[in-house]
Image (cartoon, helix red, strand yellow):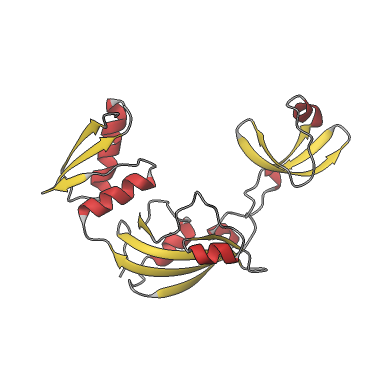
């Protein structure tokens, strides 16, 4: 049975319930068949810590209590997935603001306004309507998931967690002592918080040391 904080390896494919459009998958063949293949993506099963937000919270909640080695199909309501559409997230923006950045706004164009991504809905006179809701908000989502296994090895868990927090590292773990080689310098406060979180999700790791990877 799967529990919160378990490290699990799984495969999944996600699609919009209405129309069946696939928008995410761990399978290369499925990605190619549905026109979403990206060369920079690595298509393979993923290892994650359940309940740590790697997947949608609604999906993680549904996985808790399930069994490894089985396949499941989950239907998520909008509030369990990317949220309901909110009228407060639709704003009128001066068209002049786009033109000052050499952008010609048109319906369907994805734009970045003050660091927030939105989609242009309409352009009328000097006003452009931009929807800052998530593109999949208001949609019911269907996930097909195969739980391959629970991960038991601490080194494998640590490597997966570092990948989850976007740190590419090949750590080593021996008798509860972990060493992590970082490709960049980080402050003591960052190391402290990272160490605290690692010990929270992998309690069998008691001590953690950091080194900086030497450039060749």
On-image quarter of the C terminus: top left
* Residue 20 in which image quadrant: bottom right
| The N terminus, quarter of image | bottom left
Q: Is residue 94 left or right of residue 186?
A: right
Q: Residue furthest right?
A: 125
User: Residue 82: x percent and y percent?
Assistant: 57, 54
Residue 145 drawn above or below residue 86: below
Query: Of 91 and 13, which appears nearest the observer?
Result: 13
- Residue visible at 78% across and 28% down in the picture: 99
Residue 127 picture location, percent across and down: 83, 34
> In this view of the protein, can residue 49 be seen by the observer?
no
Q: How many marks?
A: 0
Please, is residue 19 above or below residue 40 in the view?
A: below
Q: From the viewer's perspective, is 90 left or right of 210?
A: right
Residue 46 seen in the figure? yes
3 to 214, vertically: above or below = below
Q: Is 142 positioned to the left or the right of 2 in the image?
A: right
x, y percent for residue 101: 73, 26
Question: Between 62 and 99, which is closer to the camera in this rendering?
Answer: 99
Q: Which picture quadrant has residue 9? A: bottom left
Give the camera-side residue of 86 and 44.
44
């Amino acid at each position: 049975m799967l529990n919160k904080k378990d490290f699990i390896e799984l495969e999944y494919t996600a699609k919009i319930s209405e129309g069946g459009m696939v928008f995410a998958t761990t399978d290369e063949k499925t990605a190619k068949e549905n026109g979403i293949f990206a060369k920079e993506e690595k298509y393979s099963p993923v290892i994650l810590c359940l309940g740590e937000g790697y997947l949608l919270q609604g999906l993680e909640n549904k996985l808790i209590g399930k069994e490894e080695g089985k396949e499941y199909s989950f239907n998520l309501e909008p509030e369990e997935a990317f949220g309901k559409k909110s009228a407060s997230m639709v704003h009128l923006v001066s068209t002049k603001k786009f033109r000052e950045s050499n952008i010609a706004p048109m319906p369907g164009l994805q734009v970045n306004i003050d660091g927030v991504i939105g989609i242009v809905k309409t352009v009328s006179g000097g006003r452009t309507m931009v929807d800052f809701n998530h593109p999949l908000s208001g949609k019911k989502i269907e996930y097909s998931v195969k739980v391959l296994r629970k991960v038991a090895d601490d080194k494998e868990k640590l490597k997966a967690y570092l990948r989850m927090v976007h740190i590419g590292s090949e750590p080593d773990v021996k008798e509860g002592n972990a060493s992590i080689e970082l490709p960049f310098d980080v402050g003591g406060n960052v190391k402290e918080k990272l160490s605290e979180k690692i010990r929270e999700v992998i309690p069998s790791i008691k001590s953690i040391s950091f080194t900086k990877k030497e450039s060749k």
